[in-house]
Amino acid sequence: MSGQADAACPPADFAGLVGWAPDEIGAMLAGLSAAQAAEWRWHWSLHARAAQLPPPGDWRVWLLLAGRGFGKTRTGAEWINAIAERDPEARIALVAANLGEARAVMVEGESGLLRVAAPHRQPAFESSLRRLVWPNGAQATLYSAAEPESLRGPQHSHAWCDEIAKWDNASARAESAWDNLTMGLRLGEDPRVLATTTPRAAALVLRLVREAADGRTAITGGSTYENAANLPARFVEAMHRNYDGTLLGRQEIEGELIENLPGTLWSRATIERGRETAPAQLARVVIGVDPPASAEGDACGIVVCGIGEDRIARVLADASVERATPERWARAVAEAARAWSADRVVAEANQGGSMVEAVLRAANHALPLRLVHASRNKSARAEPVAALYEAGRVRHAGFFPRLEDELCGLLPGGDYQGPGRSPDRADACVWALTELMLGRTGEPKIWFD
């Protein structure tokens, strides 16, 4: 595995011990020399689960789609470290959504490259050059997917791309970064790339899944629960309790790639097509609020939207809170209004009426509040806003997975297919966008001290 030919390496016969019984492993360990036993913990193939090892076959791209906490980062770091130790000529690209994440997760993180390498073979991190150098001369360079042009020109033998579903695809940046990277994979005899991500129907992820049909892309899937032995028991229990059977749980925990439910008002492709960064100047900012019926029930939807001089609306933030008392969600609304210098807070008053206004005024008496009363069901209110998305007049300035899941669960005629019992975030978003795009305009901006 490491490419070292000395006696410190366990015999090749012991690679792939997944599934061995404890007594079999114990017998094998008893037959190792002291030097070999010392190397035991640094040989990934002896400890990894089967889904964390490279798949067989003549693949060029390995796409690992798995739930949060599955061990994707560890898998990527171990794969890269093995390549670097084996091949002194390896020139590796490490690509993340931005350089900060590349360093914090892929290099210095709990499962990053500096943690998985044996201390006496650990690479040196030259942060000013964004480069890792192994003792044998192998090198890896950090790149940001938000800067596709930085990948135009450099050549590599291997690459690890982390969390490709969250790469910013405004102006097709994510796909441009991928294309520039793969066009530069032309060093060595067998250039390959590993893409690790929690699945989401981003354009790049869907493209790679489609390309798997040609046999050059291998796909591995996995659930968070497969790694339960290495996760806190309370975390695992909370994931079961809160997300089992939900759309969000299927995606974020089970690692299932969910595209579109048939007939929904929103499609994930439409949302992805309109994803971009927010403009520096906004003409108006509105916060939509969908108050919960009770503190024990649904979430309080709190969504921030703005409109630029180009008359295109942007979803800016999802500040929703769950299982909150009226005082707590009212404070969350006031804090969002202050943070975004909101012109207007639009709150649905069907649930509680005067109580909604009272708790919001208590949180901030100067809140620029307008109460609205729903005369139609959520889907009916949402249909004109969904049409704005289709027309390219609404874009998402960031990633809002829970909000987007709810939007993609709304059906015409009032049906909602989840996740959760009620589309609270989606309803708050609809109220805000209705105010911005379909309601009154030109109201003065109110700034907070």
Image (spheres, grey):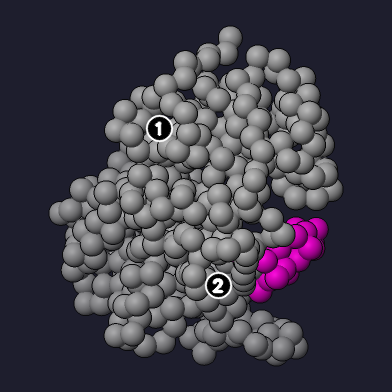
Which residue lies most toward the top here?
A: 449
Give the amino acid type for the residue marked by disc 1 in the picture.
Ile
Foreground mark, 2 or 1?
A: 1
Q: Which mark is residue 307?
A: 1
Q: Is residue 232 above or below residue 19?
A: above
Looking at the image, which residue is at 60% across and 32% down? 346
Left or right, 410 with reference to 297: left
For the question of whether residue 111 can be seen, the reply is: no
For the question of whether residue 288 can be seen, the reply is: yes
Q: Quadrant of residue 185?
A: bottom left
Comparing 221 with 284, the one in front is 284
From the image, which quarter does the C terminus lie in? top right
Left or right, 172 with reference to 274: left
Where's residue 150, x and y in %?
Answer: 23, 47
Q: Is residue 233 above or below residue 29?
A: above
Comparing 331 with 129, the one in front is 331
Q: Main secondary structure of the magenta part?
A: helix
The residue to which callout 2 is attached is: 256
Q: Which residues are magenta?
A: 225-247
